[in-house]
Each structure stands twice: as structure tokens, then as C-alpha cells.
Amino acid sequence: MLAALFFVVPVHAASWQSELPQAKVVGSGDFHWFGLNIYSARLWSEQQPFKASAPFALELTYHRKINRQRLVKTSMDEIKRLSDKSLSAEKLQRWESELARGFTDVASGDQLIGVFIPAQGCRFYNQKGLIAEIDDPELAQAFFNIWLDKRSKDNQLRAQLLGLTTGHSQ
């Protein structure tokens, strides 16, 4: 079952821009933690104004080295915090495994890009190409809610990504 939900493809696959060829930046901003600039984020969409129900991409450019396990743990902690319902241990374990396959260790300058595909799931890319495709719409929604939900930990970054306030230069 897990193999059916998660499909890994070679890293030489097309870039994320081929999924959203007309995408424009909706907004951008930086995420800081205890004064450290962790990453710069840009939200891309072909829909202007932005609609969370349409395909979009979230591009994160990291400013420091972070291992994959830390990225997965932080993402899962936020998914659990934002969940409106109790998630089963089995589902949480499956989601954690899927995110672990979709993420890579990052260093300063590295990018991870998530492309949201409504009613289907998401695809994860880095600067080399496609890393993984996750065929789980519920996980995809929960993952992108980390940045786009009204209860996001960084409401300023959320507002900047959604184009409600200005972030850093695009």
C-alpha cells in the first residue's frame, strides 16, 4: 500500500516549473528562528489572486544546513499541532515516512519546492529535479497548511506569502 501512495522518480526529471508554466510569485518572505534566518520562501501560482484550491508551489531556499530528519520532525510537529482531528498513529507514521522520502538534507543555498496538486497530492523537487510524488491529498493539505493556515506559527510570513503584506524583494 505504501508503494502505491509514494512513487520515487529519478532526480533528472523535469523541474517544478513544468507543472506551473504560467506561475507568478504571489508573495515572499523569510522565516527566522531565534534571530537566525532559516529560509526564504516564495509562493507561486498561476491563479491571481491566489486560490488554495488551485495548483501552487512553495519554494524554500535554505540559509543554513539542516538534516532531513530535522525537517521531517519539524514538519510533523506542525502538522500535528494544526490538525483539527485526532490522527491515528498509523497515519502519522505513514506521513512521516512519506515526508522522509520527499525531503533531502539541505545546506545554505539549497532549495526544496513543494507543488500542491488538488485532489491528488503533491510533488517535491530540489534544484536538481523531482524527488518524490506523494499521492495523498490529505497529507498534501496538512503539509502546506504549515505555511498557509491562519494558525501558522509565523503569521507575518503567511501574510507575506499570500501577498497580504510585503516581504523581501522578489
Image: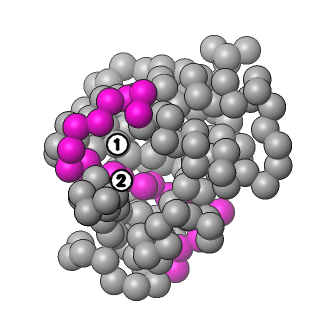
Residue 59: give its label.
2
Residue 103: give its label.
none
Is residue 4 found left or right of 158 in the rendered image? Answer: right
For the N terminus, the quadrant is top right
Query: Is residue 158 found inside the magenta-colored segment of the image?
Result: no
Q: Residue at x 48, y 26 (%)?
A: 100
Query: Is residue 68 found inside the magenta-colored segment of the image?
Result: yes
Which quadrant of the view contains residue 109?
A: top left
In magenta, the rendered stretch is: 48-70
Local crowd size for mark 1, using a 10 Å CA cut-off: few (<14), some (14–19), many (≥20): many
- Amino acid at pointer 1: Leu
Residue positioned most to the bottom: 165
**First along the sequence among labels 2 and 1:** 2
- Amino acid at pointer 2: Glu
Whole-percent x and y of residue 32?
31, 61
How far apart marks 2 and 1 lie (CA) works out to: 6 Å
Residue positioned most to the left: 109
For the C terminus, the quadrant is bottom left
The reply to whether residue 133 is in sight is no
**Quick check: 99 above or below 39?**
above
Q: Residue at x 52, y 63 (%)?
A: 153
Whole-percent x and y of residue 147?
51, 60
Q: Report the residue marked by disc 1.
A: 112
The reply to whether residue 8 is in sight is yes
Whole-percent x and y of residue 10?
36, 19
Comparing 40 with 55, the one in front is: 40
Which quadrant of the view contains residue 68?
A: top left
Q: Residue at x 22, y 37 (%)?
A: 65
Label 2–label 1 contact, CB within 8 A: yes
